[in-house]
Image (cartoon, coloured by chain):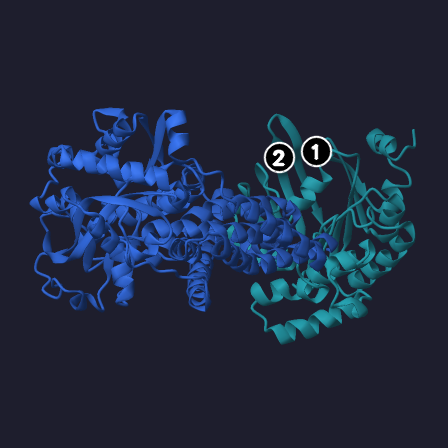
Amino acid sequence: MIELDRVTKAFGDKTVLAGISASFEPKSVVSLVGPSGGGKTTLLRCLNGLESFDSGTIEIVGETIRPGGEKANRATFARLRGRVGFVFQQWNLFTHRTAIGNIIEAAVHVRGESVSSATSRAKELLAKVGMEEHGAKYPHELSGGQQQRVAIARALAMKPEVLLMDEPTSALDPERVQDVTELLVSLVREGLALVIVSHEMSFVRAISDHVCVLHGGSIVERGAPKDVLGSPKDPRTRAFLGLE
Amino acid sequence: MTARRVYWLALFVACLLGVLSCRPQASGLAAVRARGELRWGGDTQGGEPFVFRDPSHADTLVGFEVELANAIARELGVRATFVQNDWANLVPSLERGSFDVALNGLEVTPARTGRVRFSRPYYLYRMRVMARVGDSRVRANIDSLRGLRVGTLGNSQSHDLLRRNGIEAVLYEGQEEPYVDLERGRTDAVLLDDIIATRYGVVKPSLRVVGDLGDGYYAAAVRPADEDLGRAIDESITRIARSGELRAIMARWQIDDPRLEAIVHWSDENQAQLLRTTERATFGRSHVVLFAKGAWVTVRVSIGAMLLAITLGMLLALSRQYGPRPIGVLCTSYVELFRGTPVLLQLYLLYFGLSRVVQLSPMTAAIVGLGLNYAAYEAEVYRAGLQAVPKGQMEAAIALGMTRGLALRRIIVPQAFRLALPGVTNDFIALLKDSSLVSVITVVELTKQMTITAVDVRSWLLPGLACAAMYFAMSYPLSRLSRRLEERLARS
């Protein structure tokens, strides 16, 4: 499903990704964890072309992303972006559109759906994320957790196979974390694959099939959460988890 | 702003205007003698041969009226000092005491006769019709001008004659421009004093003198309260004329004519005859109708220019922000160039300067000129708006599969426009008032209509207040709207 082959990236002389190779099973939940500056958010953003990389290849949903960013991958990205959704840390809802407006925007203007069919689907999606009451509200009228649900619904409207999520719990009240976990679990049960960047280890433990620890641009340890988080072998992982 | 505050503001403005319109103390002959100088008002823009700067010594004024003013001052035993003043407003400036005497091709017209104290005339001119060679529609009678566009100077005797006969007058502020526009075909004829026609019209080979529509007199004007100064100037001109000096001055400037003997031997009866008819127009309903027409022109120019400015400004801002570098540099240059030079100059260049290349109608030139200028300001307002849209908005759009163009159109620009709206309404209010500048390219809008009327009714106060009220009626709703938008934006 996702295949990384010696992916490198540097900002100037600072290495961000130091030749990452890995493959993840389809329909799984993969979490990228590690200290800040370890490269996990950059790697996540490379998976749908928000960030370019310098060498190597990334295979995702059957498409191959090559180095060189937008210019080198224009056609790939056009096919890819509908199938690989992204939920931002700050959600980035379109401030001038209602919740419904946010959800139908790309369906209508990228996929070419009619407004009425996109709207009825948007309402279904809002119901699915527990937001059916709030379709006519603007982002500034919604709480952080509600905005996140709209952002998830907006990504789902493109019928993605993989959803990339950057720090889905960091801007939430602790009591909301349980809600989003349940929502994501139900989406996974329907066949959606997730790649998540998170600092919240209890959340990672609860939701992941597979955990990767990134440190200094490399994957230093990976495996099932109970192994990696429970009995880490690499000293850097142990340090990161505060076990030493 | 509450209704009460608006009321007090209006009252304050009215009081201020009232104070400003009060007349200062009369100077009179005694004051001129005590000061040892005769201050005379004229407009060097009137140009050759009246009063103008010596081309070889830019700090020296020359012209037949300069020589005449010096001769009169000499007769009075004082020296002459020139005071520069816009020609169309010589009379109001005389009244408010900017100078002692207006002496600059001031024609003796019934409208002026009741307002100022004219001296005996010092020149006899003819109103001369000029047209393009080969245009046989224009003949030497007023009826042949009906239905044609006739260029002249605002508030001149020729302007009066045209208005009285219901002929469309195209109004200029300089002497050369009427003939330039006639050559280019923007007007069909020019009616102006023969002196002006000779200097500025006859020299153009594509134009011909059609004939004359009547005589008129230039005379010096003082305030009615300065009767003694007026009489002293009369006596001075009589001496200057009788001694042969007057015609000698005219001869030096190639405007001498045997007909001037009538002025040399001017009698009290002639003077009484000349000043017989006076007219007292008062500000009334007909003027309000004219103002409304002027306001309509102002609205059309402003809205047209703003639409152009908004569209072009957005293109400039987008190209600067998102376009390739050379185009960005080009757009930046545009903004700096148009912001950094006066809009008045841009209007002149567009209308007169480019008239060899493109022939824009006055209205089109006004809209395009103001629109091009304001586009530079709008571009800056939008740039600020575009920069205020968070980067994440573009990323979110891209992540949903939008192209950059689609994201700009659907996501970024609408948000930037909302952020820019208060600035845009603000600029629109400024544009509404700046639109008064287009009178220099012969568009008669509200302010121009006001100045014409003010000279007609011999008062600036009522027309000024009426004009201000009309501008306020147009701009105040806009500023209310702008405030409401700002409040709504602050909430979101």
Picture residue at 42% right of the left edge, 68% below the top: B286
Residue type pointed to by label 2: Lys
- Where does residue B453 sit, x and y in percent of width and height? 40, 57
Identify the image quadrant of the C terminus of chain B: bottom right
Q: Which residue is mark 2?
A: A9
Question: Closer to the N terminus: mark 1 or mark 2?
Answer: 2
**A132 vs B336, nearest the viewer:** B336
Residue A95 visible? The answer is no
Image spot of residue B282 (x, y percent):
43, 62
Q: Nearer the viewer, residue B424 or B289?
A: B289
Q: Which residue is mark 1?
A: A217
Verify CB contact (< 8 Å) between mark 1 and mark 2: yes
Mark 1 Cα-neighbour bin, 10 Å: few <14, some 14–19, many ≥20 = many
- Per the model, the C-alpha gap separating discs 1 and 2 is 9 Å
Chain that the image shows in blue: B
Residue A167 point in image, percent of width and height: 78, 46
Residue B87 rendering spot, x and y as whole percentages: 33, 44
Chain letter tied to cyan: A
Mark 2, residues whose alpha carbon is within 10 Å: few (<14), some, or many (≥20)? many
Looking at the rendered structure, the kind of residue marked 1 is Gly
Location of the N terminus of chain B by quadrant is bottom right
Residue A151 vertical placement versus B348 (above, below):
below
Q: Tag 2's secondary structure?
A: strand
Mark identifier at residue B173: none
Residue B77 can be seen in this image: yes
